[in-house]
Image (tube, rainbow, N blue to C red):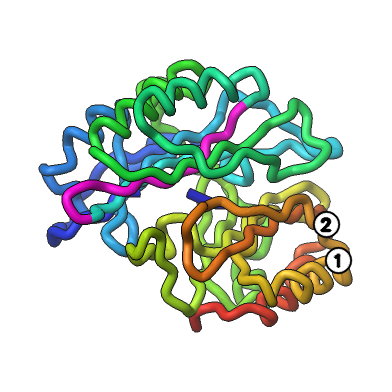
Amino acid sequence: MRSKLFLHASCAAAVLFTLSIGGSLVAQTGPSIPAEWKQVEDAMGRPGQMQPGDVLKFSMPRRDLNVTVDGTAVQPGLALGSWAAFKRAGGEAMVMGDLVLTEDEINPVIARLQAGGVTESALHNHLLRESPRVMYLHIASHGDAVKMARAIHDALALTKTPTAASGQPAAQASFDLDQKAIQQMLGRSGKVNGGILQFSIPRAEKITDDDIEIPASLGVATGINFQPAGNGRAAITGDFVLIANEVTPVIKALRDNGIQVTALHSHMLTEQPRLFFMHFWAVDDPAKLVHGLRAALDHMNNAKP
């Protein structure tokens, strides 16, 4: 599910500490952040990380929440990862993101974002039967990058979202399912982050918003996450990014394989082509789940691995 700042300068590799989706500070080797964006990081109050497509993404995992679905604990990297990211758009910037909120946090956050000129594009569920209830507020806005970053920072300060300073360096949680087998059956490579095996699958066609090309890393790639659920089972969730004629076949493929559809909605307002985001949930044998996910992916116009 997804959730940047597009930079047009070349970036040398650097070793830095970044905040993982799971909430740990971990050393990673990656492109350094150009100096022109330091003010945005300062305004956000946390480090960002460069993504493909000249995107700078900020991850804000809700490690403060203890959410369960039918008795299965939901780890932050599975479905509780707030994020925001910025992209250069002419003389301004575009920001997109997804904030994970409790019900009492929603309206104060919206008010603070609007006061700072940040536009909201969707508010909805991603899960079903979760306890406590969580909602997902999507943002899609244009303007001054620093001003928008400051508004997002101030909005998050009204929630219990952990600050960057509250994270402590820690070893990454292990993933005790057969990652190689899952990847081979799905036909895609994923990576483990905070004990969650995560896949990001871009679409093949060009996607634009207000005539600006949107790279997959700005929240328009299908996300599939696997979390060990005990006794060799996996919990899966994420969202398929679909065009209209793919919606019904993907619903059928998922349901035929015991995977629940938990939400179907938009995340953006002016994207082309029009996109639908279909969220899902299941806990079962990993091989059975991968079979269903692969069947759904086969109905989509995704980029080749």
Query: Which mark, by number, is residue 255?
Result: 1
Q: Residue at x 77, y 76 (%)?
A: 249
- The relative height of residue 152 versus residue 286 in the rendered view (above or below) is above
Q: Residue 140: x and y, percent?
A: 43, 45
Q: Amino acid at mark 1?
A: Arg
Query: Which mark, by number, is residue 260?
Result: 2
Number of numbered labels in the structure image: 2
For the residues marked 2 and 1, what is the alpha-carbon distance in whole angstroms?
Answer: 6 Å
Quarter residue 118 falls in: top left
Secondary structure at numbered mark 2: strand
Q: Residue at x 52, y 55 (%)?
A: 192
Examine the rendering and report whether any part of residue 21 can be seen: no
Q: As drawn, is 174 to the left or to the right of 115?
A: right
Q: Residue at x 15, y 58 (%)?
A: 11
Q: Residue 220: x and y, percent?
A: 49, 61
Q: Residue at x 26, y 59 (%)?
A: 54
| Sequence-earlier tag: 2 or 1 | 1
Residue 96 covered by magenta stretch: yes
Quarter residue 75 falls in: top right
Of residue 127 and residue 177, the one placed in the foreground of this image is 127
Examine the rendering and report whether any part of residue 294 can be seen: yes
Q: Residue 13: x and y, percent?
A: 18, 57
Secondary structure at numbered mark 1: helix
**Crowd class of label 2 (few under 14; some 14 to 19; many from 20; radius 10 Å):** some
Q: Residue 271: x and y, percent?
A: 47, 61
Q: Which residues are magenta?
A: 90-101
Residue 190 covered by magenta stretch: no
Q: As drawn, is 261 to the left or to the right of 31?
A: right
Query: Are the residues tagged 2 and 1 within 8 Å (C-beta)?
Result: yes
Of residue 132 and residue 285, the one placed in the foreground of this image is 132
- The relative height of residue 246 versus residue 213 in the rendered view (above or below) is below
